[in-house]
């Protein structure tokens, strides 16, 4: 290894270890890793001045941003762990709601099935009664004809012999 290579290696090692420690403040990459956001959003908010107390420090590749955790929280960013908890809570609530809706659907389906059975039974009864009604109407017509015939016979039998209609003679 030449002296020039050794110098370059030392410089790159010192540059990579030149990270400035700032307690309670995160780099943009760390903020993206810990919060539900993208690097583009964090950088945009930094340049727009929306993240209070953010500052720049000298880093391996020039000026680097540091953002206090409290600034990110105050700006409304959500920690990834909190998002998972919120998602799980929402999923749990949604799961309970889903189970309740399924139970309600089953009750309604059961009610619908019973109503359909009653409607079918009523339809059969109606058809049965309608059939009986037409039979009864035919029977009533026949009986009315019979009653009329009996009235005529009665009227004929109460007449004197000279008022009676002649009986038809059967031809042989």
Image (cartoon, helix red, strand yellow):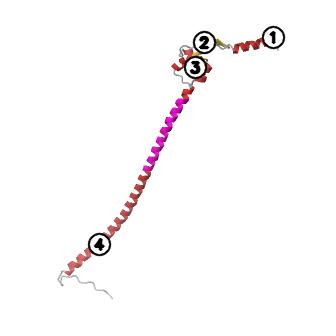
The residue identified by callout 2 is 56
As measured in the structure, the alpha-carbon distance from the residue carrying label 1 to the one carrying label 4 is 133 Å
As measured in the structure, the alpha-carbon distance from the residue carrying label 3 to the one carrying label 4 is 99 Å
As measured in the structure, the alpha-carbon distance from the residue carrying label 2 to the one carrying label 1 is 34 Å
Q: Is residue 38 visible?
A: no
Which numbered disc covers residue 42? Answer: 3
The residue identified by callout 1 is 3
- The answer to whether the residue labelled 1 contacts the one labelled 3, judged by CB atoms less than 8 Å apart, is no
Residue 35 drawn above or below residue 18: below
Observer-side mark, 3 or 2, equals: 2
Observer-side mark, 2 or 4, equals: 2
Q: Residue furthest front?
A: 23
Q: Position of residue 167 (x, y in %)?
A: 25, 84
Q: Which residues are magenta?
A: 84-111
- The answer to whether the residue labelled 2 contacts the one labelled 4, judged by CB atoms less than 8 Å apart, is no
Which numbered disc covers residue 143? Answer: 4
Q: Earlier in the sequence, mark 2 or mark 1?
A: 1
């Amino acid at each position: 290894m030449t002296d020039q290579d050794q110098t370059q290696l030392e410089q790159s090692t010192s540059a990579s270890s030149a990270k400035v420690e700032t307690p309670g403040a995160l780099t943009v990459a760390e903020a993206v890793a810990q919060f539900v956001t993208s690097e583009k959003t964090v950088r945009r908010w930094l340049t727009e001045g929306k993240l209070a107390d953010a500052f720049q420090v000298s880093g391996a590749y020039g000026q680097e941003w540091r953002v206090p955790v409290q600034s990110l929280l105050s700006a409304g960013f959500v920690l990834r762990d909190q998002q998972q908890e919120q998602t799980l809570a929402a999923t749990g609530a949604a799961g309970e709601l889903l189970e309740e809706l399924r139970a309600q659907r089953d009750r309604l389906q059961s009610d619908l099935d019973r109503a359909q059975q009653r409607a079918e039974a009523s339809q059969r009864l109606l058809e049965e009664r309608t059939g009986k009604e037409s039979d009864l109407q035919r029977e009533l017509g026949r009986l009315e004809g019979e009653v009329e015939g009996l009235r005529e016979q009665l009227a004929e039998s109460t007449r004197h012999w000279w008022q009676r209609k002649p009986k038809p003679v059967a031809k042989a």
